[in-house]
Amino acid sequence: MSKGISRELTWIVAGLWIALFFGWATDLWTITLLAYFLFYVARQLYSIKRFEQWMKGSTKVPYPPSSGLWGELSYLVSRKQRSLEKHADLQFYKSEQFLAASMTIPDAIISLNEYNQIEWFNKSAKKIFKLKHSDTGRKIETLFRHPDFIQYLKSKHYGKGMILQSLNGMPRVFNIKLFPYFKEHKLLIVKDIHELYNLAQIRRDFVANASHELRTPLTVLNGYLEVMIDSIEPSSTWQKPLEQMHQQSYRMQSIIDDLLTLSSMESETITGKQKQVNVPQILQEMHIDAEQMSHGRHSIDFKVDMNLALKGFEEPLKSVFMNLISNAIRYTPENKSIEVRWYHDKRGAHFEVQDHGIGIAQEHLSRLTERFYRVDTARSRDTGGTGLGLAIVKHILERHHAKLVVTSQLGIGSVFRCDFPNRAVILLQDSDSESRDKKIPSRS
Ligand code: ADP
């Protein structure tokens, strides 16, 4: 039995004994018991009133009832209240601590509600973007008007974030990322990466300049080596060393060309507007090149959707397609088949090269697009590889908001697939419905 009820019962029994004593002493049993009953009810009503007033926080009743059932209830309520206050104090302390910590962060942090209105921002946001207290409640799109940012905000796919080279007229590089939380609220974090970006730019410029400087002497060297090879007797002891020198300097030239391509991708020098790229036509030409590269050692099959074009940069895209096709040829043994497919589905357009070659072990797959990463260095060199092909492919695809998906099984073969988003897809006029999914005949 609870403490409150047992106390109340003690009061009732004690009161009853007194009432019975008076009844016995006066012989007025009914009146005494009735008086006791009325007294008990009045006392309860009074306690309820006091309890109610205390609960409402009335100044007239600063203390809760202290006896009987109501006293016990008041005690339990005030104990609960104290523990809640303690908890609230702790929460308040924690949130104060969090706010104080976020104020020291050099990145701008802006909290947005489900309508993208500013709810709160830290000191750095105030300093960098000159935010004022009155900006609370303002829509973020009215503050950050950059079209790429607005598109990112609307996309609801916040993933890796985005990089902007200027924001609100500030010519600095910002890394922007949105983190969704609690019912479509978002935390916007803007990091100033200007210095970091500049350092990376210096490194890129160095590689580009060094490659550029090496290009001319190498061309001269190559030219002389070619002349020397042509002019000496085939029986000469110099024939082999000269050929090897020529091969190596040719390889160096390929590496330098690839490094230059890569640095031009990185420093965003693919300029101009994206255009309609007639992929079926390009692949038709590439089929001839592929057959020439293979020298009839493989069976190469092209399955191309003839109505499917792409919005993008033509030359870089050609480089992606050729890199993947030439890799398939280089890493596939004789008499095996290679299939090239160009098709689209509801997710977008896909360029796929499947070979039945040497394959790649799983542990290498995630590193294939790193510069100079080779699974088999000797084989790559022997087949004229630079170790930069897939790094170039990755960069070009990123520029097209596309991604490279590689699946492979060692000894069985590989599939390299480029996934282009729907927004890049252009469907050519279907003048000849039979032209869809055409198998391009081999013309080697
Ligand atoms: P490389 O010029 O060495 O071929 P890439 O960047 O094109 O450089 O490819 C990186 C590495 O990925 C290659 O060295 C090779 O080991 C592996 N690779 C690429 N394509 C294939 C393929 N189709 N089959 C097997 N391995 C491949």
Image: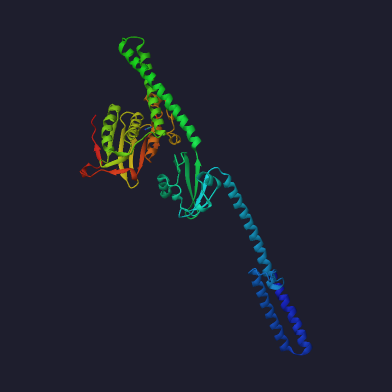
Quarter occupied by residue 147: top left
Task: Tell me: 45 left or right of 433.
Answer: right
Residue 113 at x, y = what percent? 48, 54
Q: Is residue 245 visible?
A: yes
The residue sitting at 76% across, 82% down in the picture is 18
Residue 217 at x, y = what percent? 39, 18
Q: Which image quadrant: the C terminus?
A: top left
Placement of 46 over or under 324, stated as above or below: below
Q: Which image quadrant: the N terminus?
A: bottom right
Quarter occupied by residue 369: top left
Residue 164 at x, y = what percent? 44, 41
The residue sitting at 36% across, 19% down in the picture is 219
Placement of 26 over or under 376, stated as above or below: below
What is the tally of numbered marks visible in this picture? Answer: 0
Task: Tell me: 309 left or right of 18.
Answer: left
Quarter occupied by residue 343: top left
Query: Which quarter holds ligand 1?
Result: top left
Q: Is residue 390 visible?
A: no
Q: Give the camera-side residue of 175 and 371.
A: 175
The residue sitting at 53% across, 43% down in the picture is 107
Residue 427 at x, y = what percent? 27, 44
Q: Give the camera-side residue of 273 and 252.
A: 273
Q: Give the camera-side residue of 148 and 389.
A: 148
Q: How is the image coloured?
A: rainbow
Q: Give the farthest residue toward the right.
A: 25
Q: Give the farthest residue toward the bottom.
A: 27
Q: Give the camera-side residue of 56 and 85.
A: 56
Placement of 230 over or under 125, stated as above or below: above
